[in-house]
Image: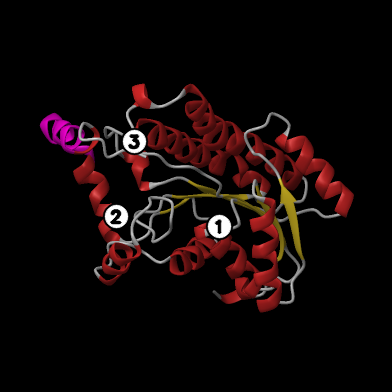
């Protein structure tokens, strides 16, 4: 960890910060002394997360209840930061949703949420933050994509395609911001033991023992280290990196088997 073990002079904005990986990002940064702005749509969970972090650390923790799918997200963030007199050094775009469902069975409202949250919000917030930090000559952005961004699989059309946007957008922004000294990193996690995918606890425990799933704590620590070193991309685990190739060459009959055995039998959320 080296020089990045002490972040006491830094402030981070983290979206989707009340649970799962987002909360672990917040806790890991707080333990390194970093002040926090926790952003989430659920105000009650925001204050609960802030209470846990302040009980464990002595850092400043601010909360902002915000629906990231609204059109004025960056204006709200700008006013909030100016109101508190803060200039955050780190932005982690972690907020996201997941569903396993065919496109034709997905409501227009759900589709709009995927696009607004995974694409518009990430792009606009990244631009807003990059513009603020470019004049300072430093700063870090971490955007959360997914291993699914390489997986054109039935049932994952919206999730995988919007996560693919995050990966390509972030990789491009990484190169654009190098001359300004602003690090931009995309994380593409494989399986993480959170509630996002709705797995029962017993299956999550088994998957972690078999190293099929990573823990949120371990993933968050490593992703933050990669971000602070201004790496362009982080994929956790050699098995996940290897699987990108094999998933990419899956023949159509295998993809159709997944559709018939899972989607067509009603296993949707």
The quarter of the displayed image where residue 2 is located: bottom right
Q: Position of residue 58 (x, y in %)?
A: 74, 76
Please tell me which of labels 2 and 3 falls first in the chain: 3
Q: Is residue 129 left or right of residue 28?
A: right
Q: Residue 254 lies in magenta, yes or no?
A: yes
The residue depicted at 61 percent of the width and 75 percent of the height is: 5
Q: Quadrant of residue 135?
A: top right
Q: Compare marks 3 and 1 and give the one earlier in the sequence.
A: 1
Residue highlighted by disc 2: 240
- Name the residue located 55 percent from the left edge and 49 percent from the top edge: 94
Q: Residue 136's spot in the image, x, y percent?
A: 77, 51
Distance of mark 3 from mark 1, alpha carbons? 22 Å
Check the picture and name the quadrant holding the N terminus. Answer: bottom right
Question: Does the magenta stretch mainly form a helix, a strand or a loop?
Answer: helix
Name the residue carrying label 1. Answer: 22
In the image, is residue 66 part of the stretch drawn in magenta? Answer: no
Q: Pick the residue in front: 56 or 135.
A: 56
Instruction: State left or right for residue 85 relative to residue 25.
Output: right
Identify the residue position indicated by label 3 in the image. Answer: 156
Highlighted range, magenta: 248-261
Q: Residue at x 29, y 53 (%)?
A: 241
Q: Quadrant of the C terminus?
A: top left
């Amino acid at each position: 960890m080296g020089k990045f073990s002490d972040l006491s002079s830094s402030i981070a904005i983290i979206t989707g910060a009340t649970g799962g990986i987002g909360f672990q990002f917040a806790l890991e940064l707080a333990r390194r002394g970093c002040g926090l702005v926790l952003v989430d749509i659920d105000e009650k969970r925001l204050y609960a997360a802030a209470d846990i972090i302040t009980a464990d650390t002595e850092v400043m923790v601010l909360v902002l209840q915000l629906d990231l799918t609204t059109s004025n997200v960056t204006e709200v963030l700008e006013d909030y930061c100016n109101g508190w007199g803060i200039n955050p050094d780190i932005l982690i775009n972690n907020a996201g949703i997941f569903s396993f469902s065919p496109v034709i069975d997905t409501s227009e409202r759900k589709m709009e949420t995927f696009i607004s949250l995974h694409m518009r919000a990430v792009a606009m917030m990244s631009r807003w933050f990059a513009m603020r930090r470019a004049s300072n000559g430093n700063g870090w952005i971490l955007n959360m994509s997914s291993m699914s961004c390489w997986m054109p699989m039935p049932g994952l059309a919206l999730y995988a395609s919007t996560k693919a946007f995050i990966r390509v957008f972030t990789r491009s922004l990484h190169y654009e911001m190098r001359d300004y000294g602003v690090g931009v990193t995309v994380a593409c996690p494989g399986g993480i033991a959170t509630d996002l995918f709705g797995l029962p606890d017993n299956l999550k425990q088994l998957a972690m023992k078999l190293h099929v799933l990573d823990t949120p704590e371990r993933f968050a620590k490593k992703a933050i280290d990669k971000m602070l070193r201004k790496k362009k991309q982080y994929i956790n685990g050699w098995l996940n990196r290897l699987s990108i190739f094999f998933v990419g060459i899956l023949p159509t009959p295998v993809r159709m088997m997944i559709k018939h055995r899972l989607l067509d039998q009603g296993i949707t959320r």
